[in-house]
Image (spheres, grey):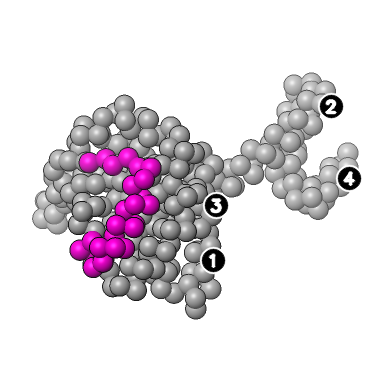
Amino acid sequence: MEKQKQEIRQLCSSFRLSAIGSDLEEIIAEAEKDNLGFVQFTLRLLKNEANHRQSKDEIRRTKAAGVPRNNNLDLYQTERNGLKSERLAQLRELNWIDQLFNIVLMGPSGTGKTALAAGLCMDAVKAGYKAYFRTMDDILNTLKTRDFVKSQMVEYKKLLKANLIVLDDIMLFPLEKNLAVAFFNFINQIYEHTSIVITTNKKPTEWAKMLDDEVIATALLDRLLFRCEVINLTGESYRMENRKTFFEASN
């Protein structure tokens, strides 16, 4: 019996069925205990492998997504910023990703824009979507360096195949003309097959000033807002209300 088990493990290794190979003893013991037939036993083996691969894939996609730690929307406090709980629930259904809708989260600093965007990104990862959370600086750095930094070209190609991209803190600072053009070209490449979530404290009407080009700003907004929900978040800054001080911690 042991010789046969070892042969099974070797075959599993050859066919890259790592979960079956590593969990073989446990699965056999459970099968004997439950008096499983051949078909049921085979099904349990394959389900074990499938669950293992699904778990590994989610871990890989979560790492690639780059989502901030504060991403659990079960803990999101909608009453703080005017977002109705019903609307949050609808957003979490993620139907808008399949429909290629964009989401613009707009409001002052500290009103939960990034936390909401990160949570939606994490929900999308768990649902099996290729979803990525990137700051505006991340995107601009990729666009600037992709032609001579291999890892950035890999990142760029990965983003082009995304189902969802979160762009955090867009238009926080003015862009140089060459970066504005590069950013527009990037959006132009993805907007027809990728949903985009944007967080910003600038109204779309202010984007022309940030881009220093009304034509580019108009073309960019045309692509982003064509199929889009604009959500205004209000209220006081969560960070300022809950700010930490060294002196309080020392007492």
Report if residue 173 is visible in the image. no
Circle nearer the viewer, 2 or 1: 1
Q: Nearer the viewer, residue 142 or 187?
A: 187
- The residue under label 3 is 60
Q: Nearer the viewer, residue 251 or 63?
A: 63
Given the image, on which type of amino acid does mark 4 rest? Answer: Lys
Q: What secondary structure predominates along the stretch shown in magenta?
A: helix
The image position of residue 234, as x and y in percent, is: 17, 41
Circle 4 sits in a helix, a strand or a loop, which is it? helix
Spatial CA span between label 1 and label 4: 45 Å
Q: Callout 3 environment at 10 Å: few (<14), some (14 to 19), or many (20+)?
A: few
Spatial CA span between label 2 and label 1: 45 Å
Given the image, on which type of amino acid does mark 1 rest? Answer: Val
Q: Which residues are magenta?
A: 208-232
Mark positioned earlier in the residue sequence (2 or 1): 2
Examine the structure image and report whether residue 37 is included in the region drawn in magenta: no
